[in-house]
Image (cartoon, rainbow, N blue to C red):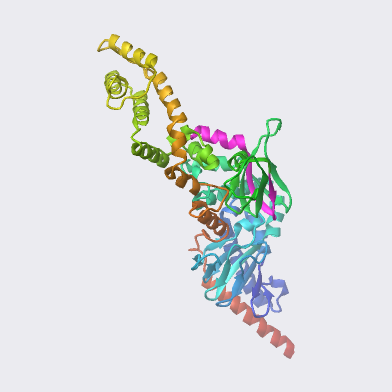
Amino acid sequence: MCARVDLQNQSRYLLLPPHTLPDATQGRKDSSLNALTNADFIGLLGTIPFFANLPKDKLAVLTEMSTIRVYPSNSVIFREDEGISTQMFVTLAGSVEVTSSRAVGPLAKLEAGSFFGEMSLLINIPRAATVKALDSCMLMSIEKKAFHTLLDQCPDVRVSVGKLLKERLLLKAILSGVLPFLESIPSERMIRFSHEVDIEDQVHKGDIVFRQHDEHDPHDPKFVFLVYGALEITGNHRKPSTFGRDNSVFLTPGCYMGPFTFDRMNLRKGKVIARSSAVLLTCPFSTIQELFEEYPAAGAAANIAWFGERCDFASVLRHGILTQRFQAFLESEHSDENFLFFQDIEKFRVIEGDNERREMSEHIRERYVQPDAPKEVNLPAGIRDSILEQMDKRSPVDAIDATFFDEACDEIMRLMVKDSFPRFKKSMQFQNVVDMLDPHTNRRGSKLVAACHHFRDSLQVLRPGHVDMKHMQLERMMSTIQKSHARRKMSSGALAQQ
């Protein structure tokens, strides 16, 4: 076995098997070298997650298909946006610098053992940055075509690699901050969720990604996350919109959409059109709804991000920042008694001890229910009188049910939804939070603008992988390549003289 070697700006040659060498003694030396070098390469590739499940014989084939290149200092390995990337790289020796036109300084410095661009083997994405050799370096590159040739021979490996790719894409999205409502869900659950999504990388310019769902459509609507490309949301406005005169919005990598998109933008007959080739992560919308049933706090954050001013009151009450702002808003209006009553009822419901629950019920009665209470709430006379009468009849040792105040709480919730909540949604305390979470516009101050740039950079180089190189004698390998090249030049010269 041998790996092809390119010496940039020098003659190109191969690490040749012994029978092609002019001298048998020299051949034995190179044969030993090739076996050792390829064993090192096989061990190296086996430590990279995307290749971990490939059997050794397949890794050996992949090693033969790989290219080892030596780059002089300051040479450019590839440039940002110079086309679709079809290679991954492993830094064997030396170091490279990663830069982007969107960043002020370098994105990363990759030392020996770093690997990057592995997603290029599986999805069609452009080069996200420029990579330049800081000093003389040696890289191993693996072509997409060669990798897929191996996957065709190992269907089970193709499945596991696909799962790993989806895990990595979703993790990068969460770490970049473009899906903030998923951040509170445990990573183990998100890994399982990632296996339920599909990768769509055959989306072409002009394709309709999806249309606005209606009640007569038998198909489950989709949740769509844009990995690469540009999409346009378009449709007809039901009434004048805050999105301006245009009936469309363009989305870039890191943005997401779903059936809520058209409601948020106040559209009818809406559709999403690909304005370039695109790569998507998709799943049935019911799948992500099931996830939020397990994690209501995450569902609340999603409801606020997706629907903005149309979000429901229950979601605000589960959202830490908005709950604090809602209370501050009510205090500024001197009308916080209903919210405080709701909070104390929530505490009352989870108390397990009978004595503690009786004490809490007396506190609620004296503070909110009885006439002239310090924070008296506006309950209908029938509900108020029923509470007071039942509490007066109860003996000091009688148990009190956790649902005792439910009717009163439901009434107060109805009042807040009808009165104070609509006023709060018009306030800057609410608007500032919602604007930062708006997934469909590039409003100044939106956290998602910077997060989308972060996600795009992370696809190839912002979070490079690293493998343990302690058993790799890289300097020996570099030296051997140079000596082998020198020997061949000498052999060629000797043959020419004969």
Left or right placement of residue 379 versus residue 473 in this view = left
- Examine the rendered structure and indicate whether residue 203 appears above or below residue 64: above
Determine whether, in the image, residue 389 is placed left or right of residue 256.
left
Residue at the image position 30 percent from the left and 27 percent from the top: 375
Please name whichever residue, 442 or 119, is drawn nearer the observer in this view of the structure: 442
Is residue 110 visible in the rendered structure shown here?
no
Q: Is residue 184 above or below residue 142?
A: above
Q: Quadrant of residue 22?
A: bottom right
Residue 349 visible at all: yes
Residue 296 at x, y = what percent? Answer: 48, 34
In the rendered image, the vertical position of residue 249 relative to residue 319, given as above or below = below
Q: Position of residue 127 (x, y in %)?
A: 62, 63
Q: For the view shown, which residue lies furthest in the front direction?
A: 240
Is 303 positioned to the left or the right of 85 in the image?
left
Determine if the magenta segment contains residue 20.
no
* Residue 294 lies in the magenta-colored region: yes
Image location of residue 61, percent across then percent down: 68, 59
Q: Relative to the observer, which residue lies in front, 374 or 102?
A: 374
Residue drawn at (27%, 26%) of the image: 374
Quarter of the image for the N terminus: give it.
bottom right
Image spot of residue 125 (x, y percent): 65, 58
Q: Tell me the quarter of the image containing the C terminus.
A: bottom right
- Quadrant of the rendered image containing residue 452: bottom right
Query: Magenta part of the protein: which range?
Result: 271-296
For the residue pair 251 and 460, the one nearer the viewer reads as 251
